[in-house]
Image (cartoon, grey):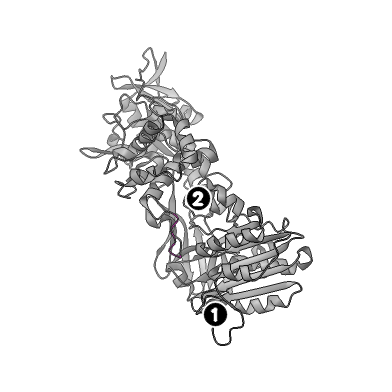
Amino acid sequence: MSEIISRESLRTMAQDWLQQGGRVFGPVRMESDLVLYSPVSDPQQLLLDGWIRPANSIKLAVLPRHEKLYEYRLKGREVELTPVDLPTAPQLVLGARPCDAGALPILDHVFNWDYRDEPYNARRQATTVVTIACQGHDNHCFCTSLGLGPDASTGSDAMLVDLGDGTYEVRLFSEKGQRLFAGKTQTSQATGQVPSGPENILDLDAIHRFLSGGFESSRWTSIALRCLGCASCAYHCPTCHCFDMVDTGGLYGGAKVRNWDACQFGIFTMHASGHNPRSTQAQRQRQRIYHKFHIYKEKFNHWLCTGCGNCTRNCPVSLGIRPVLESIQKDFQ
Amino acid sequence: MSNVYTPDLMEVLEVRRQTADVKSVRLRFRDEAKQRDFSFRVGQFGMFSLFGQGECTFNLCSSSNWKDFIEFCFRRTGKVTEGLWAIDKNDTIGFRGPYGNSYPVEKWAGKNLIFIGGGIAMPPIRCAIWYALENREEFGDITIVYGARTVGDLVYRNELERWTRYDRVRVVSCVDPGGETADWKGEVGFVPDVVKRAQISADNSVALVVGPPVMIKFTLPVLGQMGMADRDIYTSLENRMKCGIGKCGRCNCGPIYVCKEGPVFTMEQLKRLPNDY
């Protein structure tokens, strides 16, 4: 026995959400070979199957690429600050992958240790995440190595499993999910089938042990030789969350905004004196791997990765987490 | 509702030119209640906003005993500090903080204090010097070694003289060879050599060493030869920061976020960290 819903009912659900003033995010075909998560104004834009995973991630729903933190107005020698309203508008993410949803509980840690990041938390609380279980994977996927999988529930409020006939089995994981689907599903005998996903190929504990002593290893130089330093990996990653804060505006006023930033850029860590702790690309690649598989683990007991493979899929030179970790693992087994 | 990134507004009380490219600024919260309730510990830092230009990280270089104002010091070197160079009395600056850990002054009670600084690194030492002088009976002998490239590059030069008037305080100021003037009465030489020549006793002492990496690198062996243990040598790191509260992801040395678990470290702690600073 299961609860099911039709694709058309899902679109109606999204339409209702939009009409009540909420925002809806989901996979949208931007070009013939490019699917991205995007805010939608028309539920017909939602593309609920026919792709492995979008090239970006749903972190844009909780940590926008560009976000105003407050406004300032210069009045002679005085300054007037205007707070920005907390983003509390209800948000529905419809059609995320489990490797996107799985990033959210991981990110909760860094945005709440000691100091609470109010804009992040407001968006997170206002967001309901509906995932679609994966019916396939490509050579870049490695979610099972991170303890996730094609129907992993972590971070999802509800999950849809494609029944192949225009309907989905609905699995509910939270109160938000129950509220969303209440009264909208039918009981059915059908249950969805989900493949086992990519092979579990990484021994992350062994990689963590290597990293514990591998900071000065010459391998970082050889890994980074072909890296272009473009930070595409970080921008497409569901868990990369580093940001910059800048003033934008003119002579009389403007706003403090935060923008996505990335550890792959040289200026990211450059001191005012010109000294740079990470002046080479090798040091910057090393930082990215350490942040994900050592630092975050030590601090919050989570890997800062969901195995989505977006870093490699979108890398101009086919680097990314999986190839780097596989090469480390191969040499140290 | 304001968020954790929104600064408090402060009024500029006074700007003092310290050197050709360094100024110190005294600030007071525009909100009187904020000024009354504000407290910090020496060694902590703040994020200072010049609206329209950006935000910078500076040590609070005033003593935590001073209740009427806080002070920071900057070198004219980038976009924000270029803008700060033009500020004047009554202007407005944004402040977030205090952030980070601090000098463990309670642990230093009863000890002899050795302060060693170079160039623009005087401000993060100055707050601790004033704190120690104002609580003079809690500490033993105080030795201050401060050097700059030239006489004109000494920050808080007028205070070096004032500090010598306190009981059991020795001030050794120095400039790099070639940086002296005809009337210079201090030492000539690099900080590590001057520390060696000064014959400072390491007995029952803690040292606070802040300066450019090259100064620290060559001063540490001298302190070692004097018999100082790594756990008694403190420094303050100054990695680039944006948020100051452990989120933006750039100031870490391995698993340590300098903004939250620093900026103050002992050499014993630093030697356990990866070389990422």
Give residue A159's position: percent from left, percent from top.
Answer: 40, 26
Residue B32 visible, this angle? no
Q: Chain of mark 2?
A: B
- Establish if A54 lies above or below B77: above
Q: Is residue B173 left or right of residue A243?
A: right
Read off the magenta span: A273-277
- Dominant secondary structure of the magenta stretch? loop
Q: Which residue was labeled with disc 1? A: B151
Crowdedness of circle 2 by 10 Å Cα count: few (<14), some, many (20+)? many
- Establish if B72 lies above or below A126: below
Q: Nearer the viewer, residue A177 or A305?
A: A305
* Residue at 51 percent of width and 37 percent of height: A297
Amino acid on which the number 2 mark rests in the picture: Asn
Which of pointers 2 and 1 lies earlier in the amino acid sequence? 1
State which quadrant residue B110 falls in: bottom right
- Establish if B200 lies above or below B234: below
Please check the rendered image and state whether residue A276 is part of the magenta-colored stretch, yes or no.
yes
